Amino acid sequence: MDKTKIIDGKMVSDLIKAKVTTEVNEIKKKNHRVPNLTIIQIGDNKASSTYIKNKKITCEKVGIICNVLTHPETITEAELLNIINQLNHDSTIDAIIVQLPLPRHINSEKIINSITIKKDVDGFTPKILGNLMLGHYQLLPGTPKGIMLLLKHYQIELAGQHVVVIGRSNIVGKPLANLLINASATVTVCHSQTKNLSFFTKQADILIVAVGQPKIITSEIIKENAIIIDVGINRDQDNKLCGDVDFENVLPKVKMITPVPGGVGPMTIAALLENILYLYYQNNNF
Ligand code: GUN
């Protein structure tokens, strides 16, 4: 494998984790309260359990406390709102995540909006997303932030480049498209209703794929020397982790590419760690 083409998210995330560890150690040396992330999981969605486990392990590696509160699928919206209200007022908690997706009977938007902006570590509340669109950056949602950090680390030029984003979720596609526009890229956003997807993908200097379908991007539908960012985390027929991009198939044609695992995934968690520290410092006058 041509390693020079690999955008190594694991390596870049390790650099960020080392920096966060140093900062947490400084906090501990001063005998200040240790930063605390609280994650709420509703039900037992398998993918959510994996994501939460990874977040918890990584937090604990860098010295951040991570509590996971699990509740059954049958919890009511009112009960969940009440739990969030208590966490909002708990001065020992810096950051709150309500892991998505939520069961159908719960209004996700209402739940996310009930998290105080002071603890919205995901950056999903409307004010944060509105400010992001306007280019006023405070805290950024984890995956878009992780991708931007990765592009920056590898000094990948964005100004004037045609970036095609596939996926329009509130978590990844929409905020990412705005960050890229603000970085002077020419941005096209494609999604499940896009007609003739390959017409767009073939034009992408940088192709960012966040659709959650294994290996849908192949060498026939990308531009020669494209840079590919793969946000997907899927299982292939052999139950092996794979992205939305057919990695082996496109590798000879690309300039650079993120692998799965070891690309965007670890960067999302690294961005989360930075966000926890940001909220910790914002909300404490140490
Ligand atoms: N589900 C998938 N990704 C995320 C994330 O980044 N945050 C939350 N809260 N839920 C998710």
Image: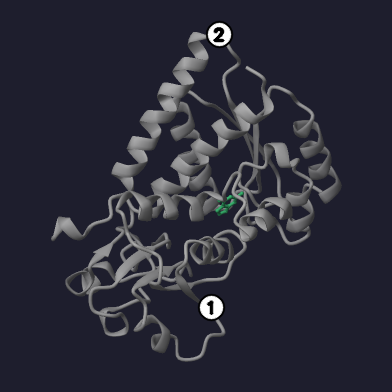
User: Where is mark 1, residue-wise?
Assistant: 191
Q: Percent from the top left, x then y, of residue 203? A: 36, 83
Instruction: Count neighbours of disc 1 (C-alpha within 10 A) and say few if under 14, some if 14 to 19, many if 20 or more.
Output: some
Q: Of 213 and 266, which appears nearest the observer?
A: 266
**Residue sitting at 28 percent across and 50 percent down?**
8
Q: Is residue 226 left or right of residue 149?
A: left
**Residue sitting at 41 percent across and 49 percent down?**
149
Choose mark 2 or mark 1, whichever is in front: 2
| Quarter placement of the C terminus | top right
Q: Is residue 202 left or right of residue 89?
A: left
**Residue sitting at 53 percent across and 62 percent down?**
182
Mark 1 beta carbon near ligand 1 (under 8 Å): no
Instruction: Count neighbours of disc 2 (C-alpha within 10 A) and say few if under 14, some if 14 to 19, many if 20 or more.
Output: few
Q: Percent from the top left, x then y, of residue 27? A: 52, 16
Element under label 1?
loop
Q: Amino acid at mark 1?
A: His
Q: CA distance from mark 2 to mark 1?
A: 49 Å
Quadrant assignment, res 107: bottom right
- Seen in the picture, residue 182 relative to 114 is either above or below; the reply is below
Q: Of 229 and 101, which appears nearest the observer?
A: 229
Q: Percent from the top left, x then y, of residue 89? A: 79, 29
- Seen in the picture, residue 203 relative to 144 is either above or below; the reply is below
Q: Amino acid at mark 2?
A: Asn
**Residue sitting at 50 percent across and 34 percent down?**
56
User: Where is mark 2, residue-wise?
Assistant: 31
Report the disc number at residue 32: none
